[in-house]
Image: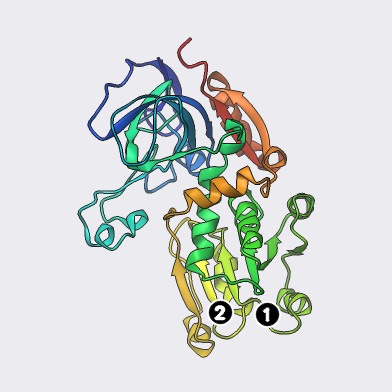
Amino acid sequence: MKSLVMPAPGELELVERPEPEMQPGCAKIRMEYCGICGSDLTAYKGVNPTVRYPIDGIGHEGIGVIEEIGENDRGLKVGDRVAMEPYIPCRKCHMCAVGRFNNCADIHVAGVHTKGVMSGHIVFPVDLLYRVPDGLDPLDAALTEPLTIGLHAAARAEVKAGEYCLVSGAGPIGLLAALGVKSKGATPILLDVVQERLDFARSCGIEHTVLGGDDLPERLKAITGGLLPQAMLECTGSPAVIGAMTEYVCHGARIALVGWPKGPVTVNTVRCIQKELDLKPSRNSNAQFPTALKLIAEGKIPTRKIITRVVRAEEAKQTMLDMMAHPGDYMKVVVRLDHMED
């Protein structure tokens, strides 16, 4: 079979690999699709501090069909299409003991710390597989994992129906996070510095969008009736946004930190104390895959608008280079993997 491997920064190769052998507690899966994540791009550029090279089979946003599986308590069988939760926990640490598997002290994320899913076949733990609803196209299901990131952030920020929630960053994660907020009955307000991305978000059903600027708090007050948002999902990692975010939310607000900064950033702790804000870093996702699959299956996520392009594995490297050179031309790119046995 073929596999997309990243031996080192700046290197991406489509190579022949033997099919993986079955392991206890796992299923063998024939892969169909995997999305390209921003972390894949930063891994290629060599600026992702979490990556462990070489990456044998990049990617962590996988969808595939079970070809071999043993007895299991999840009701999964051969022929089932599944989404893969890529955060493989140790199941031994204090975080795993309380169910916070996404924050495992020895976590191995597929395509980051261990083998990824952009291969013809993979062997993956059964307890991290989620059956795709009948009738849901696997291409649409390929947005499941990135959607869970926004849903987890909304859970961390305790977003409630009837509230306003500011989401900073109108890229794939921010847009999906805003749609996740909307699914909870809250009103998202999407912030970005690129008007074209905000226009695109509006076409996807996000009513309130704001362009960055010095008068942003006043414009947010105009939308929220003078209160400012009760929650915020920070999806950019931008030092400028993080430095000013305390002025974008009301007293007692909850802020989930999703975006990865390139280095340490400054947070106005004086304003955090004055407004008694809750800052909650949000890592990966936890228990969100069933909700994400349900939202996509119900048509509440405009997947075909968000997926900018579908490419074959041999086109992945050039596509990633173009994504880095012309980010404004892309929202979400998905790689086809159903030909990786050719």
Image quadrant where one finds the N terminus: top left
SS class, disc 2 = loop
Ranked by sequence position, the earlier of labels 2 and 1 is 1
Quickly name the residue at label 1. Answer: 228
Front position in the image: 206 or 160 = 160
Quickly name the residue at label 2. Answer: 253
Badges 2 and 1: C-beta atoms under 8 Å apart?
yes
Q: In the rendering, at what x and y percent does residue 14 appear?
A: 45, 19
The residue at the point 44 percent across, 21 percent down is 13
The residue at the point 29 percent across, 29 percent down is 70
Q: Relative to 160, say whether 145 is above or below.
A: above
Query: Gap between marks 2 and 1, in whole Å?
Result: 9 Å
Residues packed near mark 2 inside 10 Å, few (<14), some (14 to 19) or many (20 plus): many
Q: In the rendering, at what x and y percent does residue 229 appear?
A: 65, 76
Return the residue found at the far top. 342
Query: Which picture quadrant has residue 30?
Result: top left
Q: Amino acid at mark 2?
A: Ala
Q: In the rendering, at what x and y percent does residue 236 appear?
A: 57, 58
Q: Relative to 178, say whether 138 is above or below.
A: above
Query: Which picture quadrant has residue 316?
Result: top right
Q: Relative to 72, say whether 271 is above or below.
A: below
Q: How many numbered circles are shown?
A: 2
Question: Does residue 136 appear to the left or right of 13 in the view shown?
Answer: right
Res 132 visible? yes
Res 52 visible? no
The residue at the point 48 percent across, 56 percent down is 260
The residue at the point 43 percent across, 54 percent down is 287
Q: Amino acid at mark 1?
A: Leu
SS class, disc 1 = loop
Q: In the rendering, at what x and y percent does residue 90 appear?
A: 24, 49
